[in-house]
Image (tube, helix red, strand yellow):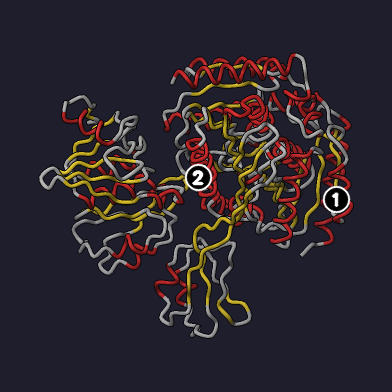
Amino acid sequence: MKIAFTTKGIEWNSMMDPRFGRTEFIALYDEEKDELTNVDNRSIESVAHGAGPQTAQKLFDLKPDVLITGNGPGGNAGRVLAQANLKIFIGAGNMTVKEAYDAYKKGELKNSK
Amino acid sequence: MKIAIASGKGGTGKTTLSVNLASFLAESRKVVLCDLDVEEPNSGLFIKGKLIHREDKFKMIPEWEKDRCTLCGHCHKVCNFHAVIQLGDQIMVFPELCHSCYACSELCPVDALPMIPQKMGELKQFKKEELSFVESRLDIGQEQAVPLIAQTLEYLDKNFDDDFIKLYDAPPGTSCPVIEATKDADFVILITEPTPFGLHDLKLAVDTMRELKKDFGIIVNRHGIGNNDVLTYCQKENIPVLSKLLNDRRVAELYSRGNLIYQKIPEFKKQIENIADYILKLQKEGIR
Amino acid sequence: MKEIVIISGKGGTGKTSITASFAMLGGKDIVVADCDVDAADMHLLMQPDWERSEDFYSGVIAEIDQEKCIKCGKCADVCRFNAIPIIDEKYVVNTLNCEGCSYCFHVCPADAISMNEQNVGEWYISNTKADNVMVHARLGIGAENSGKLVAKVKNEAKRIADETDKQFIVVDGSPGIGCPVVSSLSGADFVVLVTEPTVSGLHDLKRVYELVKKFNIPAGCIINKADLNTKVAQQVEKFLKKEKITYIADLPYDETFTKAMTKGQTIVEYDDTNLKNIVVNSWEKIKEHTNKI
């Protein structure tokens, strides 16, 4: 399984970013390889409109199975993510990445679909 | 002749001036008033005429034709507005981000993104006694006012000949919608308030009009509140002050009910008359 | 950290005067963002020190190298914005019309067109007389993309609020319903609508609230100049009830606001009576509602 997180940093103890479209990083945990990688999304700051679809496109290219985030993607990003065969879990906005992962494993996060 | 009524700051009396001046002028001349503040059109609240025409206004957006597409990816690479993106074997279009530049559509090697119309707003034409009134209204969720303003001006050009005095109620501010609404005007009236906010935004509006090389004059609304800095500025910059409209709670009350003011307050009517004379003189002298 | 955005739809309803009062009352607990970048006025009341300024580049604009141009006219043909007129037998870019789509750049057979970033304004980080930090901006004339500058101002304010652990960001939003307002609203926790009981005020309130609803943000409303027209004021209140918008306060029609502004002051500094009380209570109410979210 590949699990994507919207985050404010690139470590396990970094905070999650509750925003989807304007998240600072996308962290990707590959469970088989036990490897945490990331994509820097901070350039999105200078985008006035269309942040959601652009971040969704970056996410799509990572081909994750699961997305864990805070508020949940907005309308446009939602439209994009509907194309990806992806489970979305929300409500992890105030956790660290590690806490969010553990919460997901315990089934404590809300499935957005 | 085309006269745009604009202001830097919002709420300084653009609409009040537009509807009163247009109605007054229409008593003796051929006049069309056009509300170009398509985000928040208000003139129609004061001119309750008979609807004689309405039409939807469209902008052109690309539509993906899956069967033709070879997934070469050229479309999303040329789109500077991130309105077209590719996800695996899917192309997605985001209409509200699209600027209708046609690049993706016409540069597609296999014509898989034909442009189709999408509604962005509606235009209505009314007639109240001798006054013609045209307003356009942007649909909520549409973010770009400029294409609708441009199409409304085209409609005006097509339907009203040069005998008409054309008055435009412009949007506030100094950015793209204002430029669009004033760029083909022969004369621009900037209306302001004699306050620090009014003066600050007036200066921006004056800079904008100078950049556009427009002839313009200033009307000070609610003369008497605030201070004299606006008048001092106009004098220093050699800008004609066409009128100083009185500050009167009765004006605000009539406005709040959607009434025309010159019909109720004689002093105000006199002031509108003077502004109308100024415009008629401009017309006679044939500016430009 | 919570974000409170003040908008009005219609101009001239007192939005900026009220927002500046909240900025005074919030003091060092808040960061202020003036997102009405088209006609940014709040600095006139907040006396910022313009500590730091930066140019703002946004979008691209076409430029034609006359040396390389072979005058084939393809660029002008494809341009949907009439931005490439022929002047003195040369193809030149009308910078006010250019939308920066780059279509001309892609079709030019002579590589004569370049797309260059545009300086469209400046943004500032200032310390104000209210003992807080304000992020504000000035947009160049006729600039495109004011939405982008709004996003920049808000993001800077957020960053500062995060770093300095502030409770609130208070945002003076833009008028209308177009792209700058959309940028002002995105990410807000609570929206304060400032309106007036006039037919236009009500009309614009309804339209801008349609937009707020799309964002799903809870809202409250201040009715300024409420005694100007009690009948329309009642219609406003009815609308608030129907839409479940929190009623915050009525303010009377009072030229004291203008007098304060003329002195470069907010109403909470200038007035010591009724008006000040209403504004102070409104701010408390807004904080309470925002904290509940």
- In the image, taking residue C115 as reference, residue A69 lies left or right, namely left
Tell me whether the residue at label 2 lies in contact with that at label 1, contact meaning CB atoms closer than 8 angstroms.
Answer: no
- In the image, taking residue C8 as reference, residue C75 lies left or right, namely left
In which quarter of the view is residue C47 placed?
top right
Who's the residue at 51% across and 15% down the image?
C241
- In the image, taking residue B210 as reference, residue C233 lies left or right, namely left
**For the residues tagged 2 and 1, is the chain the same?**
no
In which quarter of the view is residue C131 placed?
top right
Image disc number at residue B234:
1
Image disc number at residue A63:
none
Assess disc 2: are there few (<14), some (14-19) or many (≥20) residues with their C-alpha within 10 Å of its C-alpha: many
Who's the residue at 42% across and 67% down the image?
C103
Say if C16 sits above or below A57 in the image. Answer: above
Subunit that carries the residue with mark 2: C
- In the image, taking residue C267 as reference, residue C15 lies left or right, namely left
- Residues B94 and A42: in front is A42
Image disc number at residue C151:
2
Given the image, on which type of amino acid does mark 2 rest? Ala
Estimate the x, y position of residue B130 in percent, counting from the top left.
Answer: 71, 41
Estimate the x, y position of residue A56 in percent, counting from the top left.
Answer: 29, 46
In which quarter of the view is residue C253 placed?
top right
